Image (spheres, coloured by chain):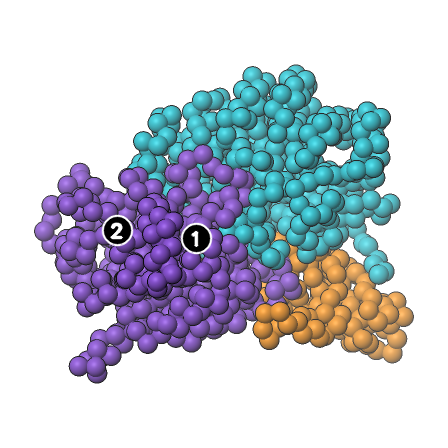
Amino acid sequence: MSIVELERSSAARSRLRIIDCDIHPAMTAWTEVHPYLAEQWIDHLSVYGSHLRHAFSEALSHPRMSPDAARVDAYPEEGGPPGSSLELMRTQHLDPNGVETGMLIPLRWNPGSQRNLDFGVALTQAMNTWQVERWVKNEPRLRASVLIAQEDTGASVAEIDARAGDPNFMQILVLPKTDEPFGRRRYWPIFEAAVRSNLPIAIHVGGTNGHPSTGGGWASYYMEEHHTVAETMQAILTSLVFEGVFERFPQLRVVIMEGGLGWIPSLTARMDKHWSRLRSEVPHLKRPPSEYIREQVWFTTQPMEEPGTAAQLIDLFDRIGWDRLLFSTDYPHWDFDDPRYAFRANLSEAQRDQILYRNAQAFYGLP
Amino acid sequence: MADGEMANAERPARYAGAIDCDLHPAVPAMSVLLPYLDEYWREMVSVRALDRLNLALTSYPQNAPLSCRPDWKPADGQKPGASLPAMQEHVLDRYQQRFGILNCLYGAQVMHSEDMAAVFCRATNDWIRDEWLSRDPRLRASIVIAAHNTELAVAEIERRADDMRFVQVLMLVSGEVTLGRRQLWPIYRLAEKLGLPIGVHAGSAYRYAPTAVGWPSYFVEDYVSQSAAFENQLQSMISEGVFAKFPGLKVVAIESGLTWLSGFAWRADKTWKGVRAEVPWVTRAPSEIVREHVRFTVQPIDAADEAAAILRLIDHLQSDELFLFSTDYPHWQFDGDAALPDGLSASLLRKIVSDNALATYPRLMKADRAMEIAV
Amino acid sequence: MARHVVATVDDIPPGQRMLVKVGGREIGIFNVGGEYFAVSNRCPHEGASLCKGRIVGLVESSEPGSYQFSRRGELLRCPWHGWEFDLRTGKSWCEPDRTKVRSFDLKVESGGALVEGELQAETFPVVIEKQYVVLEV
């Protein structure tokens, strides 16, 4: 392929300012993480590698429609996968899209899904340090997330406490496919630590836990599997509500990432409706589910919904609550949302600024 | 009576002529099925004390509030839904229903042993025919099958083909394989040929954790997760090409919650545009496929403002032909006579209460004609 | 419309493409088996650089499980969300049937028109004059 690249006009971009709540950094080579891993784990990583609850040790169970699940135009010229080049991230995304702050969400190796708990814990510690050394220190606009291996709650709490005072870290990161629904009591020490350290918990799509894609079996196609991630987020939210996590930890804040938005009003209403009939089963809930969600849960916007009319999108935002929405691009993944064009409705300047910037500014306590 | 009941004596007249697309008759005890079993199975029931098994489904704990509205519990202590006179009094007569479709949820459908499951499903259908369909000419029924052996399921459907009072094939939303899978296609092929919609009903065989994030602690979580189960299984049927392969097939989502449909349609359409090449037999947007092939019984409606919810769904899906009246009797989804909310126009009411079901279930009217011819 | 000489035929061999800028707009010129087509570099969906996407063939299906492959090299997949555009016409392969929008007896007013026009990439006439590729914009 020979493409003659010409300079792009950046006039339209200058007015944009955003906080991007979902950026995926990648490693140019696995060895990048070695400086932060003990010798034992460097060996283990190369000899045994990932050990997950599915057939492939490295590949995703359902291959995506594009390599690395990424935008085809996000490959650095010098080599390496999309998201591995800070320079390209700057020129392709941070600069032209007015990103003032970007939250890093590393997904490599699914440390929280590793069956070998000690290995998973070691990976989380290493990747947390990697985020700071490789990214945050070199680019003041970026911030890190505290990865935890949630199945080892003791180690998770230790890692949260270790990073708690470090301003480079803005949140704790968990993938929703945990061994048991994440609201279950065995995970509560993690919520305790989150509240103690005043860090929100970000739950970003992904993970492998050995449970099928659906309650009725495995998805065959990527078209199906891509849909099941929304249901996964619904299940996690349901668990957090009905287990009483929000009741027990009123200071806890959770952001649901990349789960889509269209299901939020209907699921919330469903929870309220059936809670009112079945509340004797869950007496620890003192309030309707919708109240907990309204106060303690936020949602990133990507992938943005595309209803039939602009009015339907506005109606959706009205029903979710405009203050609940945190803009995200998912750079460099294929279903990237461009901040200029993702909204199929005429938002006012104030509404745009709220979603693109002010909500996240408040949520993360940014200046 | 419950607090929410409207004292308005005219209320039930709104439903006159209704086709109730979700009624749950209960098998009072396995003993009622014995006359329909052969010698071997009768002996097995006795020797293994199978009739002492409580086959209550985890999906519907017997005494949970959802499972039976308090004023619908039969006065004589029978199981909720086990009494035809009670069903007649509570809904069939009260709402002057024209037809009522029986969806029997019984543990036989989910037994692991395929032969046992098939034999008991057959006996259940026989019992429904004799003790329900033959006692009230308004009644129609779904054919109960154990979907995990397709051959036996097909045989059971074939067995009911000529009895026009059987109008639908009943499957649970969460079974052993996703509902679009090709191994289930013989069921769909025959159903299409016979004019039987596939009634996909809330509930699970619990072959796996009900959610992709594992086993929730509480029944309320399981029940809430049903709407997501419908999303997943509908997506499976669309992606696998069930509607491409069987263009005459209709699917009815029963007791699904309804309002999830908007988010489903938006996401499914958006995804399809980018992944079309993976599933090239999906030649139309998923929402178009839904509009043509899928219908939804109304109760429960997951919304505080039910009328607004229905109107919003019609706007989002661009169709008023999707919704089918149902009481979900005896499940407790509404109080008093509020099976449908106020605020719907007369023409919309008529569609939901009657016309949409007549268009969905071609066999509904044929039973009357068949009986006339027989006489 | 103005005519612009943007390249020579040797610049864009079969199967290849070139991105040019004409009158402030970025346009991709594609050589499909000796025929030239020009498409705006802006995906109508969300503004991605459309012309950086993979050039693919067309897959259709007569029934589930069967794949009929044709028109090798004549479609363009958007590098972001993967929408397929026919290089000859600019049309998205997912353009839905134009079903009628019915009006209903609604209590709640629906607002806004259907989003239209997002399913077609803008195309431009290309002619070859001697060894020159000429674009009309």
Secondary structure under badge 1? loop
Tell me which chain appears orange: C
State the residue position of label 1: B111
The residue lying toward the viewer, choosing from A71 and A179, is A179
Say which quadrant the N terminus of chain C sits in.
Answer: bottom right
- Image hue for chain B: purple
Please, which chain is the residue tagged with disc 2 on? B
- Image hue for chain A: cyan
Which three-letter amino acid code belongs to the residue tagged 1?
A: Met
Is circle 2 on the same chain as circle 1?
yes
**Above or below A349: residue A254:** above
Asked whether, in this view, residue A123 is left or right of residue B332, the answer is right
The residue lying toward the viewer, choosing from C117 and B136, is B136
Secondary structure under badge 2? loop
Please report the residue visible at 63 percent of the width from the left and 26 percent of the height from the top: A152
Please report the residue visible at 74 percent of the width from the left and 27 percent of the height from the top: A122
To which quarter of the image does residue C6 belong? bottom right
Q: How would you rate the neighbour count of disc 1 (Cα within 10 Å): few for under 14, some for 14-19, many for 20 or more?
A: some
Mark drawn on residue A48: none
Please report the residue visible at 38 percent of the width from the left and 38 percent of the height from the top: B220
Which three-letter amino acid code belongs to the residue tagged 2?
A: Pro
**Residue B52: x, y in percent?**
32, 46
